[in-house]
Image (spheres, rainbow, N blue to C red):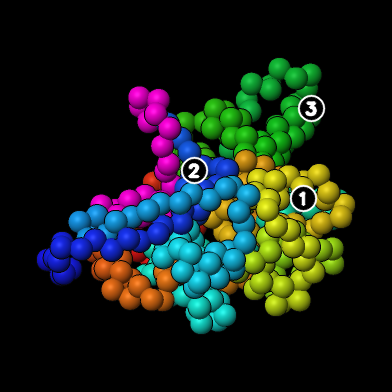
């Protein structure tokens, strides 16, 4: 580290408070796991970035690490304790608040997070079905008309494709059967069943050309219809999400002293704030009291992990993106400069980006975009 003063005659003591959580991967806290030898160790995105910083600065500082309990949940309290000198740096994902910026310094951001509400996908299923039938009814009529048109064309210009029906009682019934078979072939094709269309064609150039044209038309129509159905179902889910203009009537659950809770409350949401509880316990409390609460306020990264664990939950994330970083005691100005320099170098070399992709591989692209 050529850009950092190399004075090793005195190692300043830095008190490091490491936030520890109760879950792995999708968290801004460190979590316990085991190495290949079965030894218990800590891991996590924010913690692993800290390990990089620590390794680069170990020659200059004497680090004393203190680990939180998973139930230590009040981030504003961590900020106050850092301001008062109890800690020099806190390893976790802190969002900026004006009142926090007056008390501590933020290190360079290492990830983008967001304020979110995690909640049940509670859209009226009957309403979605009615909307699907309303739109699909029109589409199905279009398909039926197109199928009849194709069938008539087949009957007029390629009726030898159904010559095997000649054994039907008499010529009148044969004509009728050929017509009905051509109609059913056309209708079946636009609904995705092209077996009759392809297998029973005659081998003339004209018939083969008709076959290719009608199969192309049928394929496009089937794909379009499937796309429209999917769009309707996804829109049903999207319309069930909360926004700044569509906050729930029932109260939300949130952690006291967390920036996500504070910011969503500012939009007018009703929130029951809890302390000394883990995120897992917070989500479980909601799941056991869905009649009382509309959802849980969490960061996007945390919400994503719980949404993977509980498929019935979805994330409303239109409450602002947030750069997340460590907080540092304002009296430790040189230490902050050293930390920031290493974070910048780790971002430039893509080390942090690789760690971000490792821990948050399935999240929205904004999460690792800053680095």
Query: What is the C-alpha distance between the residues marked 3 and 2?
Result: 77 Å
- Relative to 117, 130 lies left or right: right
Q: Residue at x 77, y 50 (%)?
A: 286
Q: Which mark is on residue 338?
A: none
x and y percentages locating residue 262 in the rendered image: 66, 72
Q: Residue at x 46, y 35 (%)?
A: 33
Q: Is residue 356 magenta?
A: no
- Lower position in the chain sequence, tag 3 or tag 2: 2
Q: Give the quarter of the figure containing the N terminus.
A: bottom left
Q: Secondary structure at mark 3?
A: helix
x and y percentages locating residue 40 in the rendered image: 43, 32
Front tag of 2 and 1: 2
Q: Are marks 3 and 1 in contact (CB under 8 Å)?
A: no
Q: Nearer the viewer, residue 26 or 69?
A: 69
The residue under label 3 is 173
Query: What is the C-alpha distance between the residues marked 2 and 1?
Result: 23 Å
x and y percentages locating residue 75 in the rendered image: 58, 64
x and y percentages locating residue 326 in the rendered image: 43, 64
Front tag of 3 and 1: 1
The residue under label 1 is 286
- The span shown in magenta is 35-55
The residue under label 2 is 31
């Amino acid at each position: 580290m050529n850009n950092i003063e190399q004075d090793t005659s005195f190692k300043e003591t830095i008190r490091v408070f490491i936030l520890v959580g109760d879950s792995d991967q999708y968290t801004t806290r460190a979590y316990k796991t085991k190495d290949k030898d079965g030894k218990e160790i800590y891991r996590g995105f924010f913690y692993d970035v800290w390990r990089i910083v620590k390794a680069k600065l170990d020659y200059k500082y004497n680090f004393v690490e203190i680990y939180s309990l998973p139930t230590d949940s009040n981030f504003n309290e961590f900020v106050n304790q850092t301001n008062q000198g109890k800690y020099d740096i806190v390893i976790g994902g802190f969002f900026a608040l004006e009142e926090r910026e007056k008390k501590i310094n933020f290190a360079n951001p290492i990830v983008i997070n967001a304020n979110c509400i995690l909640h049940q996908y509670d859209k009226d299923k009957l309403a979605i079905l009615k909307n699907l039938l309303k739109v699909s009814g029109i589409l199905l009529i279009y398909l039926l008309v197109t199928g009849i048109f194709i069938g008539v064309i087949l009957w007029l210009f390629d009726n030898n494709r159904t010559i095997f029906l000649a054994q039907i009682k008499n010529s009148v019934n044969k004509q009728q059967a050929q017509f009905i078979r051509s109609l059913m072939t056309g209708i079946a094709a636009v609904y995705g069943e092209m077996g009759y269309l392809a297998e029973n064609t005659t081998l003339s150039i004209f018939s083969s050309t008709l076959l290719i044209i009608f199969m192309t038309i049928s394929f496009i129509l089937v794909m379009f219809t499937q796309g429209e159905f999917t769009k309707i179902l996804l829109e049903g889910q999207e319309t069930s999400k909360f926004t700044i203009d569509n906050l729930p009537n029932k109260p939300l659950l949130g952690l006291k002293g967390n920036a996500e809770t504070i910011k969503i409350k500012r939009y007018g949401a009703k929130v029951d704030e809890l302390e000394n509880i883990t995120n897992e316990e917070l989500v479980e409390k909601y799941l056991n009291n869905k009649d009382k609460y509309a959802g849980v306020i969490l960061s996007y990264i945390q919400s994503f992990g719980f949404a993977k664990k509980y498929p019935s939950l979805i994330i409303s994330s239109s409450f602002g993106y947030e750069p997340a970083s460590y907080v540092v005691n304002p009296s430790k100005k040189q230490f902050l400069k050293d930390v920031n320099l290493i974070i910048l170098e780790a971002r430039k070399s893509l080390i942090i980006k690789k760690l971000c992709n490792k821990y948050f591989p399935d999240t929205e692209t904004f999460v690792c975009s800053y680095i």
